[in-house]
Image (cartoon, rainbow, N blue to C red):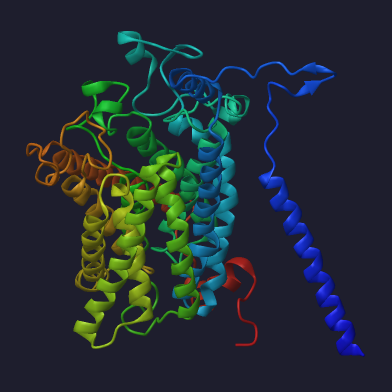
Amino acid sequence: MQFIRWYAALAASVLFLACCATTGLAQLDSPEPDKHTELVDGQPAPDAAPALTPEERLAHIEALAQEGVNAGHNAWMLVSCALVLFMTAPGLAMFYGGLVRKKNVLSVLMQCLFLMGLMTIIWAVYGYSLSFGGDALAEPGVEAEGEAKVAAYSPWIGNGEFLFMNNVQQSWKDGAVDTPMTDKIPTLTHMLFQGMFFIITPVLICGAFAERMKFSTMVVFLVLWGTLVYCPLCHWVWDKGPLGFVETSQLGSRFAVMGGALDFAGGTVVHISSGVSALICALLIGRRLGFGSEPMPPHNLTYTSLGAGMLWVGWFGFNAGSELACDGLTSSAFAVTHFSAAAGAVSWAAMEWILRKKPSVLGAASGAVAGLVCITPAAGFVQPMPALIMGALAGVICFLACTTLKNKFGYDDSLDAFGVHGVGGTLGAILTGVFATRACWDIDEGRTLGLLDGWMTGGEFTARIFIGQIVATGITWVYAAVATYILLKVLDLTMGLRVSQEQEIQGLDLSQHGEEGYIYI
């Protein structure tokens, strides 16, 4: 009886579906009613509006584009904001946290989490304004011209245009006037995206002084560093300042150096500045107790490898999001980011395999990050195959910097912030001047960009951009090093840089925060 019920139910279901299909096919076969003969309230329906011509459709689309924000671009940029914040915590927090000894793991996590909050507040109050304030406007919506433009715009630091989020929230409906660098997203979105860079850049420096710097001194130092180093550099490179590309500089050739810097996502602003500052920190703070005489292995490479994977994913927002739109160049930046990371992971591990007979998880993770750092300034300017070359070179050169170079000079860059970010960022900035091509972005009105651009696209050879990359890199090195040195010297005299020997032996988790990461281990 039970089988009979099942068969009956199945037959009823099949019959029902057959009826539905027959009805649907009958509707498809029935002719459409003529819109001219259809009656409305007993009268013939009015004729439909005449179709728009292609020219009228194009004009309509252009008018819509000028009305406000592009929803697709804005959606991608908000996702990119989340991806870049994801790089700081949990990405960088786990990557750095696994590299320190277990008595210091919470101190690294606290640095990442606390700076996420503190740097956000600073960015909202004045950081965004110092970085991107000042558009040389004669009046709202009208750009000044000639000498008035030069007089109104400060090339060295932003003005008070966006202090306390002034002139940010009010422009969310229309990004065509007030948004720095783009007319496709609202100023509020641009502020959020750039704020995520302001968060992660100082956190990178923490890798140099891990396990020995006072938490209070770290807070004051990185607040001052973000204000006096990051904000000016950001303004110089990305807000049409003296290191910006000459064709986008507010001041034109009067201030831009040798054609300016091509920095798509932060080779100079983020990685060179933080990496060089990390080296100065390592030199001035000194080595950890027992460095060179006792082993200091990472306490949890599982954390580090997971953190590296999170950084890899988050970097798509970091680089591809720097297009500030979602278009073909976004796809290109996405692809070259992935390619460079892949080549970096393989080349670093291959170096270990050749020299040490065993490739390591730490090596593959570090190589991936090195490849990501190297491609950052070039993400919007190079094609996929040069990206593979850049990533492979980054893996090899950063490996040598973190081993041979560090051993030769004996400095204690605890988590290799300089070896990966300083060296990798410098390499990427210089190689941008080699591989940048107008096939990706014709920013210079048909003129070739990198050293190889003429060969790749059939243009003439020029070294203008290559020289500009070297000059901008050198200026960033000098400015970051000098400013960091002065800040640390002042703080050493006033607050002191290091914890006491007893606190360092005990571990920063207990001595600075009164907690332990692993109670039962």
> Looking at the picture, how far across and down is residue 411, in whole percent?
28, 67
Residue 58 in picture, x, y percent from top left: 45, 22
Q: Is residue 230 above or below residue 311?
A: above
Task: Give above or below for 30 relative to 317.
Answer: above
Would residue 448 be found to the left or right of residue 136 on screen? left
Q: Which residue is at the front of the view, 388 or 2?
A: 2
Residue 359 quadrant: bottom left
The single residue placed furthest to the right in the displayed view is 1
Which residue occupies the foreground of this view, 246 or 380? 380
**At 42% from the left edge and 54% from the top edge, which residue is drawn?**
492
**Residue at the image position 53 percent from the left and 57 percent from the top:** 86
Q: Position of residue 505 (x, y in %)?
A: 49, 78
**Residue 5 makes an appearance in the image:** yes
Q: Is residue 341 left or right of residue 185?
A: left
Q: Nearer the viewer, residue 357 or 298?
A: 357
Q: Is residue 234 above or below residue 98?
A: above
**Quarter of the C terminus within the rendering:** bottom right
Residue 232 left/right relative to 186: left
**Which quadrant of the rendered structure holds the N terminus?**
bottom right
- In this view, the residue farthest toward the left is 461
Q: Quadrant of residue 245?
A: top left
Residue toward you, 8 or 292: 8
Report whether residue 278 is seen: no
Q: In the image, residue 222 lies at what x, y percent?
A: 47, 49
